[in-house]
Each structure stands twice: as C-alpha cells, then as structure tokens.
Image (cartoon, coloured by chain):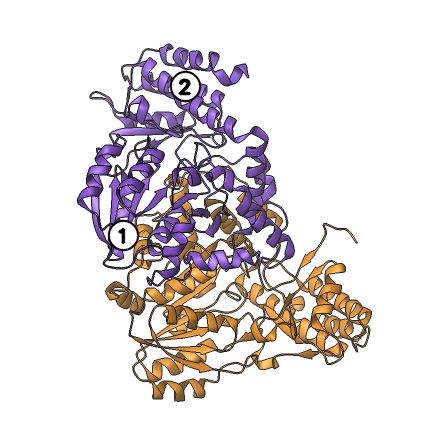
Chain colours: A orange, B purple
Amino acid sequence: MLPDKFRLQIPGPTPIPPGVQQAMAQPMIGHRDPDCSRMVVDLSRRLGPVFGTKEPVLIFTSSGTAALEAAAVNTLAPGEEAAVVVSGAFGDRFAKILERYGITLHRLDVPWGEACQPEILADFLRKHPQVKAVFLTYCETSTGVLHPIGELATVIRQETEALVIVDGVSCIGGVESRFDEWGLDILVTGSQKALMLPPGLAFAAVSERAWQVIENNPQPRFYLDFKTYRTNLEKETTPYTPAVSLLFGLTEVLQMIETEGFTQVIERHDLMMRMTRAGIRGMGLTLMTSDSDASPTVTSILGGNDWSSEDLRKELRRLSFRVAGGQQHLKGKIFRIGHMGYCDPVDVLSTIATIEVAAKRINAPVRLGAGIQAAEEELIHAPSLNH
Amino acid sequence: MLPDKFRLQIPGPTPIPPGVQQAMAQPMIGHRDPDCSRMVVDLSRRLGPVFGTKEPVLIFTSSGTAALEAAAVNTLAPGEEAAVVVSGAFGDRFAKILERYGITLHRLDVPWGEACQPEILADFLRKHPQVKAVFLTYCETSTGVLHPIGELATVIRQETEALVIVDGVSCIGGVESRFDEWGLDILVTGSQKALMLPPGLAFAAVSERAWQVIENNPQPRFYLDFKTYRTNLEKETTPYTPAVSLLFGLTEVLQMIETEGFTQVIERHDLMMRMTRAGIRGMGLTLMTSDSDASPTVTSILGGNDWSSEDLRKELRRLSFRVAGGQQHLKGKIFRIGHMGYCDPVDVLSTIATIEVAAKRINAPVRLGAGIQAAEEELIHAPSLNH
C-alpha cells in the first residue's frame, strides 16, 4: 500500500478539504486588523443557520471540551443542582466537569448505545425539581447514538425552568439543528468533526434566557467567560487572540456548506449513515445501535466472540483505513466509523468494501460482497440522486 | 501598491514561514493515533531548550491568555495572597485574572515603559511576606519592555518561598530563557509570536516545586488543569483533542530553530532590536524605552506634539506595512513595531526606510535617510555577520 495515503474514517478529527487547507495558508493578519474584525462578525452570523439560530454564534480558540466546561461554569454556581443524561463517554465528561465545580449532580444513566426516551427524562426531572440546568449530548460520539434533542428539550421545558444545555460536538454541521425552535439554551460544538476543520475552534449558540442566567452567575471564569465574548463581538472583535488560520478555514467551510446547501449536507450525512448500516448488516456484522437511535455522523459496530474488533482495526490500518476503537468499558469491544464532514457516499463504499476484505483476512464471519451490495443499493435508490 | 502584499510588523500574530504553512497542510490525523502520540512527546521535549528547561513543556490548545489563567488557577486558591508586577496591559491582565478568582492581590505598579528594578521588588516583597506567588511579565508587549527575569527571580527566591510565575508570551523563542537555572516555576507563552505559528497553541514550563503546589491546590479547574496534561503526556497523549495542524507546524518551527541554532536566533533578535532602535533614533523619533529596558522582539515609539502616531500607522498601512498602536492609556500615543519570529534584518531595513517615507508624508519631523543609515551601520557591524 502507499504508506502516506490513508483514509481517516474516525469520528473526528476528520479530513480537511483542499480548499480549506488553501484558505488556512493565507498570509497571517493581526487579530485587531479590520480584516479580522469583518471575518469574526461574518463567521458568527453565518454559523447561525448551521445551529438553527438567528443569534450570532460565539467562537472560542480551544478544544470542544473547553466549550463543555464553559457551558457549565457560565450557568451554574457551586451547590446548585443540575441533571446530566449520561449514555457514553461524553455525557460522562459533562458529569465530571460538573462534579469538579461542586455542582450537585443528578445523573440519569441510559444504557450505552441507546437514546434517552423523553418520558424517562420527564420522570427523572419530576424527582429533581430543583435542577437549574439539564445537560444533554446530541450525538454521543462513543456509541454513535443520536439523542432526540428536540423532544428532550420539549419535556425539559414542560417539567422545569431548567436551562437546556447540549453537547453537539460530533454532529453539528452534519445533522439538523433547530436551536431557536427547539428551545435550546446552549449548544456547543468543535471544529474538527462535521465542520471539516482541524481541531482548535469551539462554538456556542446561547439563548436570551441563558444570557440572563449567565449575567448573574457568580462562578468565577475568565478565558471561558461567555460575557466577554459577547461584548467583544458587539465591538466586532474577540477578547483574546483567536486561531486566525482556522478562522480563514472556517470562512471556506461555510462557503462550501452554503454552496452545497445545508439541507443537502444533512441528506448526505443521512445517506452515508444508511449506506454504512446497510453495509455492516449486509456483511453479517452487528450494529451497536437501533436504526431509530443511530447518528448520521458515526456508526459503532460490535466485535464478535471469535474475532477481535482491535484486530480488525489493525488490519484496516494496513489497508489504509483508520477507524476508531471503543472508549472506557467498550475498549476492545467495538469499532467506530466516522462518516461526516468532508466525506461522501463513495468514501462509504470504499470503507464498506475494505471492511469486508479486512474482516475476511482476520477470519471474521462475513459474507464477502453482501455488505457492499447492500450499501450500493442504498446509494442507487438515494432520493438525493434523483433531485 | 499591491493590494494583497503586506508586511505584518505587529508584535503578534507574526508572519508564518512557507515551510510551516506547508507542514500545517499535511493530511489530518487522529489525536489518538500513534503518529500524533510521537509528535506530542517529541514537541514537548524539543520545546525544552527554547524555555531553558530539561522538563517536558506542556502544550495547550488555546490563546495565550488561557495559559496565564492556567498559571493562576493551578497554583492559588481564593483568599491566598499573590504579588503582581504591572508595567503594562499584560501585567494588568494577570492582575484581572487573579482578582476574578478571589486572590488577595498586591500590585507593584511600575511606570509603563520601564523595567522593574530588582531592589524595588525585594522591598515590595518584604512588605508582603505572605504572598504565595509572584507574577511577572518577561516582555511587556504593550510597551516593549523586557524585564530582567533572571534577576527578579533571584530576589524573589531570596525574599520569599513564593512561586515565580512568568508571562513569556511575546518573547519566548526570540530571547534567552533559562527556566531551570533562573529558578522560575511557571513560564507560559503562545504560538503566534516569536514561535512563528498561527495563534491557537499555548505552552507552559512547570518546575518540580510548582508541581507540589499544583497537586495540592483545591481551586477547581478542568480544561486548564495542568495535572491532566502531565498525566496524559506520561501516557504519550493529550487529555483533549489538540490543534493538530498547529502541532504539524510546530514540528517544522522547531526544526527551523534547531537548524539556525537557538543562540543565533537570539542574536538575530538582538540585532533586529538594535537596528530598529538606531533607525528610529537616527530619523529623529523618540523611543519609549531605554536601551537597557528594551525588548529584542518589540519596539515602542512615541508620537509627537505636531503629528499623530495613528496617522503614521495609517500611512504605513497604505505603504503595505502593518504596525500596532498603543493599548489602554497609550492608545493614540505610541506605535509599536514587532520584530520577532520569521523576521530578519532586511525586514527591519525596509521597515525603517518605509517609516521614514510615511513620517515625511505626514509631515512628522524626521531626517530622511538618517534613520535607515543608522540601521544599516548596525547591520554592517553586526558580530553575527562575521561568524
């Protein structure tokens, strides 16, 4: 195989489009330069449709985790109560952040690989009427579950006055998001997933209701203080030096999304999910999640009794494909395919075909050709091809 | 003038070398990939000589300000006492961060444009024997002063048990730094200054003495928790997804520094400072700082009574040069030239010559040709040219 040709099919970081690479290579500019001001204002507005909000979106120079922490420290003070829905490693990270800051935590554990049912959350919130915020994960990256955020937000609004705070890191930009319509209060994501950028930027949409809490929250914070970003954005700048090259890249990313059309972007991700799932099922391997709980951006597949998902990953690596393993107690038990961002149905075809080859080579019980045929069928009948 | 050809002579962000741009455009890799592990370990070690430490240097995905905040929240708890030397906007930022976190602050204000004298700091510390940490700025970006960090650290060690915490954002990579030898405890910097990268990474060297304080400090922190970065570095990884493309770039930056030789890098910055200062003096404008207090990375020049530094900046911009203005109460009163990172003596010659042109055009009282001649003399007699 070509040693430097590889396919990055992990659930982030994801491949960078050539046009975005070129955009990021523009000559550096000063962060207080008028050109930078124009870019910051433009980006914060053009991110709105991707989040489903009319409000400008805040931009941070950080990993996604810093934005999760920001959502917590901007809205809650020590001793206040919060609920967290934990269905994987990233719900668990929300819980760890809240514990670190002395928030009284009510943890709703959902089996890993399943979505949270709205009625179960409603019951849970009735038992904890004091919660000031409910923390949800839109796509749980560690399992490939997409939680029904719109429905969950509805029951939260029905049952409580709590803020609805959502980790959208591994899906925003690849799935529908109706921040304003669903009544979300904070929705954060990172740059290195469906948004096709290198890691290093994080984003947050914030509701007017959340701003009222944020303004009055005594929890000390500095770099992650949302207020500072809002007041600086009003002055058409950022409080601290932002990752300018990534902002150059984001400008091109949003141009790409607008050119394709965001509805088509969402359809493409949905199609890639269906192709991946049909392919995995067709070859005889076992999907971790049900069709109704599955994420359009990442798919988890269970290892078998007589073959190891880690051996499959190694074999795929030899064949130029990089897929992810399991996290925490799923380590060595699943593998995960990312299909988001700069990824299209042909990438899924080659992924499925190569998984068949790799699985056969490690003697996993797969039906050669059956998986790729099922994936092809999904593509042949894709409604988006008949537009 | 060519509309897209401009010279970025501000004190950061600084221009990106073409080889670094190319390195950053490498195909994305996963942050848990063995290739990324090797890179993280390699970088944290190779940064050591630039800081002057044998310890691995921690790498953060953030602006430099987050690293300033990290230095504070990792070492101090609310109610504890700290001293801050404030001689400009960035010393002031340290103070603001500490105040935000409820630290009892003893502020030693030094006139903007002057370095802190060791004996004055010694006197000050004798009055405040309870301070647990002293916060210093190595190069005060807002004025172009380089504080004598080695001497200041010596008096701090003589007078107190306090940690010595240093903001090195606008000079590390361009000046001498002897972290271990000087007895510093934390030294932070950012990527977008002398280190020739886009903004988005920050770095911290941490002493063994500091680690003992950090381990026991109850102040809650998550994304900025130094401990998490150390334990993950021991496992050859990072706690959260790092800005991978900037790490690619940093690998090339360190290669460039090692090829030139760090001693030569320091000499080059020193020469650029001397050329800039000779040029400014020669043309008849007034430097803000004395020779002994001047930074090798940034030079501040006072505006005049009958001409405005902002008009000069505008004229320089028309002539393709971007220089910085003053911050806080110096706004409109000074302009600042950055001469660090991917910048060489010929860049300084063109900067000085163009300042003569711009100054003449706005009728500032300059002696045309006298500045550039003085700068040329410095270059002609540069010891580094006779190596």
Q: CA distance from mark 2 to mark 1?
A: 38 Å
Q: In the image, is B227 to the left or to the right of B79?
A: right
Percent position of residue A92, x then y: 47, 73
Which corner quadrant of the image does residue B140 belong to? top left
Q: In the image, is B297 to the left or to the right of A339?
A: left
Q: Where is B347 relative to A182, above or below?
A: above
Percent position of residue A60, x then y: 41, 54
Q: Which residue is mark 1?
A: B98
Please say if the residues under marks 2 and 1 sit with CB atoms less than 8 Å apart. Answer: no
Instruction: Name the kind of residue labelled 1 in the image.
Output: Leu
Which of the two residues, A343 or B280, is positioned nearer the viewer here? B280
Closer to viewer: mark 2 or mark 1 = 1
Q: Secondary structure at mark 2?
A: helix
Q: Which class describes the residues within 10 Å of circle 2: few (<14), some (14-19), or many (20+)?
A: many
Lower sequence index among marks 2 and 1 = 1
Q: Which residue is mark 2?
A: B275
Q: Where is A220 relative to B180, above or below?
A: below
Which corner quadrant of the image does residue B321 belong to? top left
Is residue B283 in view from this perspective? Answer: yes
Instruction: Name the kind of residue labelled 2 in the image.
Output: Met
Chain letter of the residue beneath label 2 in the structure image: B
